[in-house]
Image (spheres, grey):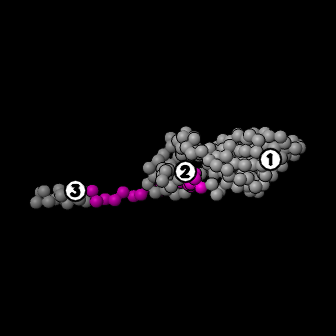
Amino acid sequence: MKHFVWLIMLLLITSCKKDDLIVNGLVPVYFDALDFSEIDSQEPRAIIKQGKFVKVGNFLFVNDIKIGIHVIDNTNPNQPEYVYFWRIPGNQNFTIEGSFLYADNGPHLLVINIEDYANIQFVKYIENTFYENLLEQFPDEPAEYFECPDPSKGLVKYWKRAEIVNPTCLKI
């Protein structure tokens, strides 16, 4: 009988369900680095997270980290005019040589014909050129819960705020 009481107590203790931890954190939004259909020229938009910029002739090209490149007509430096936004998901770095833009989209090096700024054309890619970009798959915010990235879903395009149940990743 004594063992039976202990068994019942043990079952009661181990059967208690913990409450889920629900936090407001960051979840990744993914993109496929081999899907080049999202590379295009669009209407100008506001810069979200500025990266490097390059000057070619009267134009400035400003990187919007992991989103794309802003094209600015700087013919009149007192009144620069945003003319296009080139959407290149995952882009963090680029250079321009003649009519070609060389840019990353995460791990790959892309070659894009920019002869017509309004109608850029994907030319080719060189696979897995930038391995270190694969390591940058975590949010910038310190001391933040986030949903752990899942490489099988693609590369992280950006992070959005959402409720997370029982998060397993925390950036300190």
Give SS at disc 2: strand
Drawn side of residue 59 relative to residue 136, left or right: right
Residue placed most toward the observer, 119 or 78: 119
What separation in Å lies between label 1 and label 3 (alpha carbons)?
A: 70 Å
Q: What's the mark number on residue 155?
A: 2
What separation in Å lies between label 1 and label 2 (alpha carbons)?
A: 28 Å
What separation in Å lies between label 3 and label 2 (alpha carbons)?
A: 45 Å
Q: Which residue is mark 3?
A: 10
Residue range highlighted in magenta: 14-35
Characterize the local packing of mark 2: few (<14), some (14-19) or many (20 or more) Cα atoms within 10 angstroms. Answer: many
Residue type indicated by callout 2:
Leu
Horizontal and vertical percent position of residue 61: 76, 44
**At 47% from the left edge and 47% from the top edge, which residue is drawn?**
169
- Number of labels in the image equals 3
Q: Is residue 41 above or below residue 97?
A: below
Give SS at disc 3: helix
Horizontal and vertical percent position of residue 72: 80, 47
